[in-house]
Image (cartoon, helix red, strand yellow):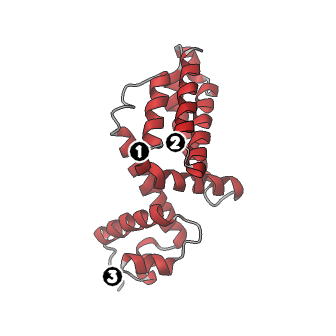
């Protein structure tokens, strides 16, 4: 008779695996070094998650849950709209403590674009999750809420500036570019 699954152990392993992935990324992730870092065996990881793919999807879901909780707790974004929301999200996303999340975001996002199937649903969700939030916040009237073009532009600018900042480390220039973009939105 097989031993029943231990949900508490699985939750601990998931939390620790999420921390590991945030620190090391997904590229070249191997179960043996991961298990060693978590103080367990590959056999136990596979017992808890049944496959490497299921483990990775659970880890990415956990990381997205953490990110959503952090954003929800960010006072600057609560109740903000238009340029204020863009600035609040930028302040949150570009902070040093968010660096591991953003690096992982771009790793998954680029992989989803390069390899259909691997993370394609996750990559799509990372974009579409923001469309409704920004679409509603930027809408000039209820009729504008259905138009996702403004929200798409905001997401693209934020994403591009974040990628630029992560690649170059140039916080001053990217902050100034975001401030200019927020002023452009305010003047539309």
Spot occupied by residue 172 in the image (x, y as percentages of width and height):
52, 38
Q: Residue 158 placed where, x, y %? A: 56, 37
Label 3: few (<14), some (14–19) or many (≥20) C-alpha neighbours in 10 Å: few
Image coordinates for residue 4, horizontal then vertical, percent: 32, 77
Q: For this rendering, which residue is in front, 4 or 158?
A: 158
Q: Is residue 85 above or below residue 116?
A: above
**Residue holding disc 3:** 3
**Of pointers 2 and 3, the one earlier in the residue sequence:** 3
Residue at horizontal 48 percent and vertical 58 percent from the top: 60
Circle 1: element type:
helix
- Identify the residue shown where x is 28% and y is 68%: 8
Q: Please name whichever residue, 18 or 48, is drawn nearer the observer in this view of the structure.
A: 18
Instruction: Measure the alpha-carbon separation of dots 1 and 2.
Output: 23 Å
Q: Which mark is residue 172?
A: none
Of mark 1 and mark 2, the one earlier in the sequence is 1
Rate crowding at label 2 as few (under 14), some (14 to 19) or many (20 or more) other CA atoms within 10 Å: some
Element carrying mark 3 = loop
For mark 2, what is the residue? 171
Q: In the image, is residue 116 above or below residue 13? A: above
| Residue beneath disc 1 | 68
Crowding at dot 1, Cα within 10 Å, few <14 / some 14-19 / many 20+, comes out as few
Q: Quadrant of residue 20?
A: bottom left
Circles 1 and 3, Cβ within 8 Å, touching? The answer is no
The quadrant of the rendering that contains the N terminus is bottom left
Q: Label 1 to label 3, Cα distance in Å?
A: 34 Å
Q: Is residue 102 above or below residue 139?
A: below
């Amino acid at each position: 008779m097989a031993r029943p699954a231990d949900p508490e152990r699985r939750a601990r392993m998931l939390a620790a695996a999420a921390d590991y992935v945030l620190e090391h990324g997904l590229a070249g992730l191997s179960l043996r070094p991961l298990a060693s870092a978590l103080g367990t065996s590959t056999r136990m990881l596979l017992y808890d998650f049944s496959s490497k793919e299921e483990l990775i999807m659970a880890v990415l879901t956990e990381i997205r849950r953490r990110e959503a909780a952090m954003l929800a707790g960010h006072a600057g974004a609560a109740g903000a709209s238009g340029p204020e929301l863009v600035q609040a999200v930028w302040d949150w996303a570009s902070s040093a403590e968010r660096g591991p999340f953003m690096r992982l975001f771009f790793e998954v996002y680029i992989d989803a674009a390069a390899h259909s199937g691997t993370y394609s649903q996750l990559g799509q969700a990372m974009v579409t999750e923001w469309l409704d939030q920004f679409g509603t916040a930027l809408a000039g009237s209820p009729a504008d809420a259905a138009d996702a073009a403004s929200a798409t532009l905001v997401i693209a600018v934020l994403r591009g500036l974040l990628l630029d900042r992560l690649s170059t480390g140039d916080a001053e220039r990217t902050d100034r570019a975001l401030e200019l973009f927020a002023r452009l939105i305010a003047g539309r």
